[in-house]
Amino acid sequence: MLCKETTKKTRGPFVKGPIPYEWVKKACKAGAADLAWYLWHKKGILGDNASIQIRPAELKKLGLGDRKRQRQTDKLENAGLVSVERG
């Protein structure tokens, strides 16, 4: 498979790296890759030490409804990849 190369003229959302391969692999094995990519996107915007507030409206645009979002949040937490503050 070949991916289309981006140019400096390409604009829009992106996922900032580097992204640890082992972390992504664990997220995929846990069944939470959709939410994992969203979190890495937000981390690139907010910075390394920022808490990420999950915004349901943003996730719905990515095809993650409320139930799927909650299941994937639980899976990432159970896999030890994220810590969650609910409130």
Image (spheres, rainbow, N blue to C red):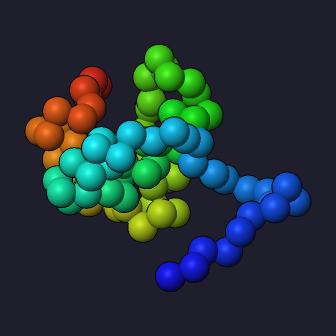
On the picture, is 14 further left or further right than 40? right
Is residue 22 visible from the viewing direction of this image? yes
Percent x, y of residue 77: 18, 36
Percent x, y of residue 46: 58, 27
- Residue at the extreme top of the image, as rendered: 49
**Residue displayed at 71% across by 69% down:** 5
On the picture, is 44 further left or further right than 12? left
- Residue at the extreme right of the image, as rendered: 9
Percent x, y of residue 59: 45, 55
Count of numbered badges drawn on the protein: 0
On the picture, is 19 further left or further right than 77? right
Q: Nearer the viewer, residue 72 or 22?
A: 22
Location of residue 46 with respect to 6 vertically, above or below: above
Q: Nearer the viewer, residue 61 or 77?
A: 77
On the picture, is 37 further left or further right than 32? right
Location of residue 35 with respect to 79 vertically, above or below: below
- Residue at the extreme bottom of the image, as rendered: 1
**Residue displayed at 63% across by 51% down:** 14
Is residue 70 visible from the viewing direction of this image? no
Q: Quadrant of residue 17?
A: top right
- Residue at the extreme left of the image, as rendered: 78
Percent x, y of residue 68: 26, 60
**Residue displayed at 74% across by 64% down:** 6
* Quadrant housing the C terminus: top left
